[in-house]
Amino acid sequence: MLHNCLTSADTPADATLEVTRALFVDLLVGRAGLKELLFSDDIGFAGSRLDLMGFFAMLDKPEGRFNLVTP
């Protein structure tokens, strides 16, 4: 389960990931996976790799079929 909470700017992050928008979208929709994330030149990373993998483990792969507008 993914939660967010308000903290001060001085609170250190467990992991920080800088990623291009294109790679982020590919990760969310399943076109890219852990291999692409780890070996991409489009990322910057600092912190715990375990915490980062735990974060991505919380994301579900979208089914791809849903109504945008329902009558």
Image (spheres, grey):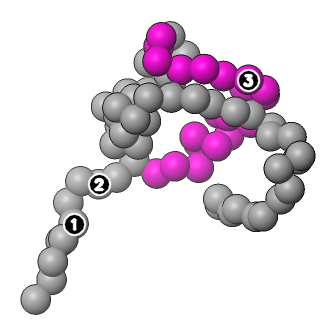
The question of residue 8 being in magenta is answered with no
Mark closest to the chain's N terminus, 2 or 3: 3
- Residue 64 is situated, as x and y percent measured from the top left of the image, at 23, 53
| Residue indicated by mark 1 | 66
Q: Residue at x 46, y 18 (%)?
A: 42
Q: Which residues are magenta?
A: 40-60
Amino acid type of disc 1? Answer: Phe
Mark closest to the chain's N terminus, 1 or 3: 3
Amino acid type of disc 2? Answer: Glu
- Residue 5 is situated, as x and y percent measured from the top left of the image, at 76, 64
| Residue indicated by mark 3 | 46
How crowded pointer 3 is (Cα within 10 Å; few <14, some 14-19, many 20+) is rated as few
Q: Is residue 27 visible?
A: no
On residue 49, which mark appears?
none
Q: Is residue 14 left or right of residue 57?
A: right
Spatial separation of the CA atoms under disc 2 and disc 3 = 31 Å
| Residue indicated by mark 2 | 63
Circles 2, 1 touching at the beta carbon (< 8 Å):
yes
Q: Residue at x 41, y 42 (%)?
A: 28
Q: Is residue 49 visible?
A: yes
Spatial separation of the CA atoms under disc 1 and disc 3 = 36 Å
Say which of marks 2 and 3 sits in front: 3
Amino acid type of disc 3? Answer: Ala
Spatial separation of the CA atoms under disc 2 and disc 1 = 8 Å
Q: Residue at x 48, y 11 (%)?
A: 41
Name the quadrant containing residue 67. Answer: bottom left
Say which of marks 1 and 3 sits in front: 3
**Element type where label 1 sits in the image:** loop
Residue extending furthest front? 9
Q: Residue at x 68, y 40 (%)?
A: 54
Front-lying residue, 39 or 6: 6
